C-alpha cells in the first residue's frame, strides 16, 4: 500500500533579518515592617515541648508566677515570666502545673503531691542553687512527677540525695529528661518501675545515668540480680536499644537492658561452663567481683580452675573484676585414660570392656601391638599426612574432645579397621578432613565404626568433579553414634557392594545425606539422616537394597529418591521420613517397596503416612507401588500426585497397592478453520489446564480457547478444570484489519541563500525551509494488527536530496518502522543540496509510504 505527494517550490526570496526587542519593567515595592508584642495570656497544652500525643492534654491558660501562687480546687497552672529564685513546694493532695517558659528557676522543687513540669520554649532550667548540692526536683514518697520538658541542674555533691531528679515514687516521662550538671548519676529512684514511659522518647546525645538508692531493701541490688526500672517501655519504644537512652551509675557493676516488655537494671551475669553443664551467678556491686566460685568435678580429670577461654585465657578468682556479662570455662588436666572402646556411648555390647589408651599428639607415628593400637588425642592438632590403616591392622582412636584437622584425609583398606569414639562428656571431638574429593575411603574388605565424636568434611569437588563426603564407604561401615557432616557435599557416599548400617548418630550433607552408587545395602534402625538442600537417600544403583526400620530421614526435596535404578526398598517399624516434595520417589516400575520389614526384621511398617511419587507417563495405570501391605498399614501410603489414588489388589500372591487415575479427562481442540497440534491432550479435574497449543489461521489473529464456538468461557493455562467428562475447546478468531490514517504537511519548501560573503561575492550556508509543519508526515495505526511502515523519497531534481527524521529529536529513522495498534508515528522530511537554477513551484521529488 503506498501514498504519494508531490512537492512544489516557490520563487527565491531575498535574505531578511527580523529583530525583536522585548522590554520588561520591574517595580520593586518595600513592605512596612511589623512588630509582634507578647500575648497578654499564656496558653498551650500541658505537655508543650514534648512529643506527647495524648488528646486529654488540651490547652490551658497559665497564670504568671510572681513570688507566690495559689491553688484553685487543689490545682494551679503557673508559668515563669522572668528568672526567679525560689523553692517551690507541692504539698500532698495538691497538683502544680509549671511551665518554665524558657526562664531559669534558681532553687528546687519539692514534690509531696503531683508536679507537671514543661517548657514551651525549650531553654528553661531548674537550677538547685550555686553549689548545686540539692536535687533540682525532689519527689517524696507517694508523690507523682510528670516530666514534659526543661533542663535540670544539681546534684554536684557525692550524696545519694544530690541528683538533678530524685524520687521515692513515680516519674511519668513524656520526653527524655535533660541534665547539664555532671554528677554520679542523673536520676535516682527508690521503688521498682519508678520510670513510666508515656511517649516515644527521642534518643539523647548521651544516655541518662540512673540508679536505685542502696538503702531500700526492695530494690537493693546487693540482694537481688535484677529489678525493673520502667513500665510501658515496649509499647512505646519497641526494641529500641536501652543502652542508648539510659545507663547505670558509673560506680556500680550493672547494666540496663530490655527484658520482656520493660527495662531492668541487672548485675553482670557470669556463666560457668564446666564441660558437663552450665550454671549462672552474678557479680556483686562492690567492685564487680564474685563472692565465691563453684568447684566442678570430672571423672579422670583434675580441675585446673576457671578461665575466660576454653583454652588459655585469664584465670578467674574472687578478686577478678567483671565489667560485662562473661562466660568462663573450666579447664582440666587429664589424670588417666581408661574406658571402653565405645567410650560410654549407647552401645550395649558387653565385650566393650575398659582398655588402656596411649597418648597421641595427632602427628607422631602410632605404635601397634599385635596389629592393634589404642590411642587418644591429647591436644588439638593439624596433620598433613594421611591416616592409613591397612593390611589387617586395627586402630582404635579416641578423639578425647580434641580436634584433629588433616588435609590428606584418612584411608582404611586391605582388611584394615578403624574405630572412632570420643570420651569427652560433651562429645566435642572432631576428625576434620579439609581435602577435596574422595580423600577418606573405606575399601577392600575393610571396616569402619563410629561410636561418638564427629567426622567433618570441609573440602570441595576435586579436579574430576568428585563430591566431598564425610565418609566414603566402599566396604563395611557401622554408625552407632556421633556425627558425620559435609559442609559442601554428601554426608556419606557408599559404593561398590558396600554394607552400611546405621543404628544411631547423625549424618548431615549439604547436598545429599546418603548417596548410594553401584549395588550395596543400607540398613537404618536409628539415628538421623538430614539433607539441607536435596534428598535424604539418593541412589543410582540398579541392585541397591534400602532397609529402613527406625530413625529419622529429613530432606527439603525427597526423603528417598531413586534415579534410573531398580532398588528394593524395605520399610518396617516406625521410622520418621519427611520430604518437602514427597517422602519416597521411584522412577521405574521395578523399584519395589515392601511394607512388612525384611528378613531378620519381621516388623511391618507402622510409622507416619508416606507420600509416594512415581515417574509415570499419563496413561500408565495398574502399576504395583507397595507390596505386602496389610489392613494395619495399607492406609499409611498415599500417592503424592492428586491425579492418582491407591487401590489394593492381589498380584502374584502379594497384597499390593496399585496406582489408578483420578478424574482424568481428554480435551479435544477444535481449531475452527485453522490448524492445531496437538489435537488432544489429557487434563485432570480441579487442576489447571496447563500449557495449551496455539493454532494458526491465515488472515486471522488467535483470540484464545473457549468452551463454545461462539461466546462461551475463555480458557487459559491457569484455568482450573471443572468439567466432569471429556470435552472440546474451540478456537476463536479475529479477522486481521490493516488500516492507517496518513496526514501530510503541505510539503512546500523554500530555499534560502544564506549569508552573503563579500570576499567571495557568493552566498554561503544556504538551507531549505518548510512552511509550519509543512514537512510533517503523520501515520496512525487504526487497524487491529501491528504494521510496519517504510518512508522513502524519489528524486526528480537530482541536485536536491532528502531524508526522514523523527519528529522531536530529529534523529534519522530506521526503515521499516514498527507501528503497533493504536500508535502514531510522526516524521519530518529534510532537504539538502542547492538547486542549480532558480525555480518556482517546481517538483523536487516524490514521497512514498509503504505498509508491510
Image (cartoon, grey):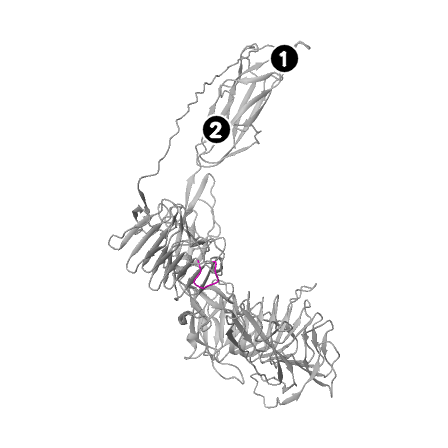
Residue at image position (75%, 78%) is 364
Distance from label 1 to label 2 (Cα)? 33 Å
The image shows residue 837 at horizontal and vertical percentages of 61, 10
Depth check: give the residue in front, 273 or 462.
Answer: 273
At label 1, counting other C-alpha atoms closer than 10 Å, the crowd grade (few under 14, some 14-19, many 20 or more) is few
Identify the image quadrant of residue 220: bottom left
Depth check: give the residue in front, 345 or 593.
Answer: 345
Depth check: give the residue in front, 786 or 828.
Answer: 828
What segment carries the magenta color? 156-163
Q: Secondary structure at mark 2?
A: strand
Is residue 665 shown above or below 381? above
Q: Main secondary structure of the magenta part?
A: loop
- Pointer 1 with pointer 2, Cβ within 8 A: no
Identify the image quadrant of residue 367: bottom right
Which residue is labeled 1 in the image? Answer: 836
* Residue 159 lies within the magenta run: yes
Side (left or right) of 460 relative to 554:
right
Residue at image position (55%, 67%) is 323
The image shows residue 461 at horizontal and vertical percentages of 66, 64
Q: Can see residue 543?
A: no
Q: Can see residue 600?
A: yes
The image shows residue 463 at horizontal and vertical percentages of 70, 63
Which residue is labeled 2 in the image? Answer: 779
Q: Earlier in the sequence, mark 1 or mark 2?
A: 2
Image disc number at residue 677: none
Seen from this angle, which residue lies furthest left?
A: 73
Q: Secondary structure at mark 1?
A: loop
At label 2, counting other C-alpha atoms closer than 10 Å, the crowd grade (few under 14, some 14-19, many 20 or more) is some
Side (left or right) of 253 relative to 196:
right
Is residue 465 shown above or below 600? above
* Residue 179 lies within the magenta run: no
Identify the image quadrant of residue 727: bottom left
Amino acid at each position: 500500500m503506498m501514498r504519494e505527494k508531490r512537492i512544489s517550490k516557490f520563487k527565491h526570496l531575498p535574505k531578511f533579518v527580523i529583530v525583536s526587542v522585548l522590554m520588561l519593567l520591574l517595580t520593586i515595592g518595600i513592605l512596612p515592617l511589623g512588630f509582634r508584642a507578647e500575648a497578654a495570656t499564656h496558653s498551650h497544652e500541658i505537655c508543650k515541648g514534648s512529643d506527647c500525643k495524648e488528646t486529654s492534654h488540651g490547652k490551658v491558660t497559665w497564670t504568671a508566677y510572681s513570688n507566690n501562687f495559689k491553688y484553685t480546687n487543689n490545682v494551679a497552672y503557673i508559668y515563669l515570666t522572668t528568672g526567679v529564685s525560689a523553692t517551690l513546694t507541692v504539698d500532698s493532695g495538691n497538683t502544680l502545673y509549671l511551665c518554665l517558659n524558657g526562664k531559669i528557676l534558681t532553687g528546687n522543687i519539692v514534690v509531696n503531691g503531683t508536679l507537671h513540669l514543661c517548657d514551651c520554649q525549650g531553654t528553661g532550667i531548674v537550677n538547685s542553687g550555686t553549689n548545686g548540692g540539692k536535687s533540682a526536683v525532689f519527689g517524696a514518697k507517694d508523690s507523682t512527677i510528670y516530666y514534659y520538658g526543661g533542663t535540670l541542674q544539681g546534684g554536684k555533691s557525692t550524696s545519694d540525695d544530690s541528683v538533678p531528679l530524685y524520687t521515692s515514687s513515680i516519674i511519668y516521662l513524656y520526653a527524655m529528661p535533660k541534665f547539664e550538671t555532671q554528677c554520679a548519676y542523673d536520676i535516682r529512684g527508690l521503688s521498682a518501675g519508678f520510670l513510666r514511659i508515656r511517649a516515644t522518647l527521642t534518643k539523647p546525645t548521651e544516655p541518662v545515668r540512673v540508679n536505685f538508692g542502696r538503702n531500700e531493701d526492695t530494690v537493693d541490688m546487693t540482694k537481688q540480680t535484677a529489678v525493673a526500672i520502667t513500665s510501658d517501655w515496649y509499647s512505646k519504644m519497641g526494641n529500641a536499644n536501652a543502652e542508648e537512652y539510659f545507663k547505670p551509675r558509673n560506680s556500680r557493676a550493672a547494666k540496663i537492658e530490655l527484658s520482656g516488655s520493660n527495662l531492668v537494671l541487672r548485675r553482670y551475669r557470669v556463666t560457668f561452663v564446666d564441660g558437663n553443664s552450665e550454671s549462672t551467678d552474678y557479680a556483686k556491686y562492690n567492685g564487680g567481683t564474685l563472692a565465691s566460685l563453684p568447684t566442678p568435678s570430672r571423672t579422670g580429670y583434675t580441675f585446673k580452675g576457671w578461665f575466660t577461654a576454653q583454652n588459655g585465657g585469664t584465670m578467674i578468682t574472687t578478686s577478678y573484676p567483671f565489667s560485662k556479662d562473661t562466660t568462663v570455662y573450666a579447664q582440666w588436666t587429664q589424670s588417666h585414660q581408661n574406658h571402653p572402646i565405645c567410650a560410654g556411648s549407647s552401645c550395649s555390647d558387653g565385650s566393650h570392656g575398659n582398655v588402656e589408651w596411649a597418648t597421641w599428639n595427632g602427628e607422631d607415628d602410632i605404635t601397634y601391638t599385635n596389629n592393634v593400637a589404642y590411642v587418644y588425642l591429647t591436644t588439638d592438632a593439624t596433620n598433613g599426612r594421611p591416616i592409613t590403616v591397612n593390611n589387617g591392622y586395627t586402630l582404635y582412636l579416641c578423639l578425647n574432645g580434641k580436634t584433629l584437622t588433616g588435609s590428606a584425609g584418612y584411608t582404611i583398606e586391605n582388611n584394615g579397621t578403624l574405630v572412632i569414639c570420643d570420651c569427652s562428656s560433651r562429645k566435642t571431638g572432631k576428625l576434620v578432613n579439609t581435602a577435596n574429593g574422595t580423600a577418606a575411603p573405606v575399601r577392600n574388605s575393610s571396616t569402619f565404626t563410629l561410636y561418638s565424636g564427629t567426622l567433618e568434611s570441609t573440602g570441595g569437588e576435586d579436579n574430576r568433579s568428585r563430591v566431598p563426603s564425610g565418609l566414603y564407604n566402599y566396604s563395611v561401615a557401622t554408625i552407632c553414634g556421633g556425627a558425620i557432616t559435609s559442609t559442601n557435599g554428601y554426608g556419606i557416599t557408599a559404593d561398590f557392594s558396600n554394607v552400611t548400617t546405621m543404628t544411631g548418630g547423625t549424618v548431615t550433607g549439604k547436598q545429599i545425606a546418603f548417596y548410594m552408587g553401584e549395588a550395596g545395602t543400607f540398613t537404618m534402625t536409628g539415628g538421623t539422616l538430614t539433607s539441607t538442600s536435596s534428598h535424604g537417600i539418593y541412589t543410582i544403583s540398579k541392585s541397591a537394597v534400602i532397609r529402613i526400620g527406625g530413625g529419622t530421614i529429613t530432606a527439603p526435596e525427597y526423603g528417598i529418591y531413586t534415579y534410573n535404578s531398580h532398588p528394593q526398598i524395605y520399610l518396617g517399624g516406625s521410622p520418621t521420613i519427611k520430604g518437602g516434595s514427597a517422602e519416597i520417589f521411584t522412577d521405574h516400575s521395578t523399584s519395589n517397596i515392601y511394607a512388612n520389614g525384611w528378613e531378620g526384621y519381621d516388623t511391618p511398617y507402622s510409622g507416619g503416612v508416606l507420600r509416594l511419587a512415581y515417574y509415570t507417563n499419563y496413561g500408565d495405570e495398574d502399576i504395583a507401588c507397595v507390596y505386602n501391605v496389610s489392613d494395619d498399614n495399607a492406609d499409611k501410603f498415599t500417592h503424592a500426585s492428586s491425579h492418582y489414588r491407591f487401590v489394593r489388589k492381589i498380584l502374584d500372591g502379594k497384597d499390593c497397592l496399585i496406582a489408578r487415575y483420578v478424574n482424568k479427562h481428554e480435551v479435544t481442540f477444535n481449531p475452527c478453520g485453522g490448524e492445531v497440534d496437538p489435537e488432544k491432550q489429557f487434563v485432570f479435574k480441579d487442576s489447571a489446564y496447563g500449557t495449551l497449543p496455539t493454532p494458526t489461521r491465515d488472515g486471522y489473529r488467535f483470540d484464545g480457547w473457549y468452551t463454545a464456538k461462539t461466546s462461551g468461557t475463555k480458557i487459559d493455562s491457569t484455568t482450573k478444570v471443572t468439567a466432569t467428562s471429556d470435552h472440546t475447546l474451540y478456537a476463536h478468531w479475529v479477522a486481521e484489519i490493516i488500516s492507517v490514517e496518513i496526514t501530510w504537511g503541505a510539503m512546500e519548501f523554500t530555499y534560502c541563500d544564506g549569508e552573503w560573503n563579500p570576499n567571495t561575492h557568493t552566498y554561503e550556508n544556504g538551507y531549505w525551509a518548510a512552511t509550519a509543519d509543512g514537512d510533517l508526515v503523520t501515520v496512525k495505526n487504526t487497524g487491529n494488527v501491528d504494521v510496519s511502515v517504510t518512508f522513502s523519497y524519489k528524486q526528480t531534481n537530482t541536485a536536491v536530496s532528502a531524508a526522514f527524521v523523527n519528529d522531536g529529536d530529529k534523529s534519522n529513522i530506521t526503515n521499516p518502522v514498527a507501528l503497533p495498534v493504536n500508535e502514531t508515528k510522526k516524521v519530518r522530511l529534510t532537504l539538502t543540496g542547492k538547486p542549480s537554477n532558480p525555480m518556482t513551484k517546481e517538483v523536487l521529488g516524490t514521497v512514498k509510504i509503504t505498509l508491510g
